[in-house]
Amino acid sequence: MFLLACVILTGCNRSPAINIRAEARAINAIEEQWTAAIIAKDIDKILSIFAPEAVVMNANTPACIGAQPIRESLESWFADATILHDTFKSAIDTIEVSASGDLAYVRGNSRLSISTPGGIVEETDKWITLYRKINGEWKAIVDIWNSDVPKN
């Protein structure tokens, strides 16, 4: 009887199995939505991907902490007419989900065209986004990117 009670109690203490592949697919879908939102300049959709206290570290600017500074950064970026947002493309290099299924990171690269006095140039970037599962949903908690173009 004691052995049976131990087996039952041990079974009750087990966490549900995490399907890492399914979680990675869910994050991949979010990344696809994010790319579409950039092309559409859909700030509200992009903000819905972030946790309220998220941190965004754009190249050559101070970090944005929280929804309002992130919104302002996006508004400024989308207002820049030299950036051809409809050319934005992003590719994921890797998605890693923790064994606990509540943290993940995505590493990738992106490119878009920029109008310069010398003509259209393509900028390539690299980025990492950290995700946390909050109330059953993946939310970006830290996003950082920088350009592959050497600074003059």
Image (cartoon, rainbow, N blue to C red):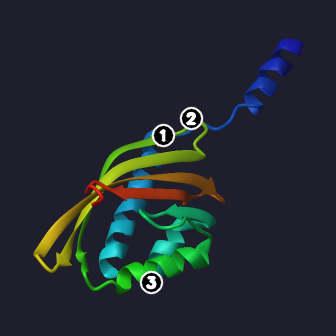
Can you identify the residue that label 2 sits on?
99
Local SS, label 2: loop
The nearer-to-camera label among 3 and 1 is 3
Locate residue 124, reporting x and y percent: 24, 58
Locate residue 135, reporting x and y percent: 66, 59
Amino acid type at circle 3 is Glu
Q: Nearer the viewer, residue 24 or 139?
A: 139
For label 3, count other residues whose C-alpha is less than 10 Å away and answer few (under 14), some (14-19) or many (20+).
some
- The residue depicted at 47 percent of the width and 67 percent of the height is 61
- The residue depicted at 45 percent of the width and 40 percent of the height is 96
Q: Quadrant of residue 145?
A: bottom left
- The residue depicted at 76 percent of the width and 32 percent of the height is 12
- The residue depicted at 52 percent of the width and 46 percent of the height is 104
Which badge, 3 or 2, is on the more N-terminal residue?
3
Locate residue 75, reporting x and y percent: 44, 83
For label 2, count other residues whose C-alpha is less than 10 Å away and answer few (under 14), some (14-19) or many (20+).
few
Contact, CB < 8 Å: mark 3 with mark 2?
Answer: no
Local SS, label 3: helix
Contact, CB < 8 Å: mark 3 with mark 1?
Answer: no
Can you identify the residue that label 1 sits on?
20
Amino acid type at circle 1 is Ile
Local SS, label 1: helix
Amino acid type at circle 2 is Ala
Can you identify the residue that label 3 sits on?
75
Question: From mark 1 to mark 2, how far is it between C-alphas?
Answer: 7 Å
Residue 1 in sight:
no
Question: From mark 3 to mark 1, how far is it between C-alphas?
Answer: 35 Å
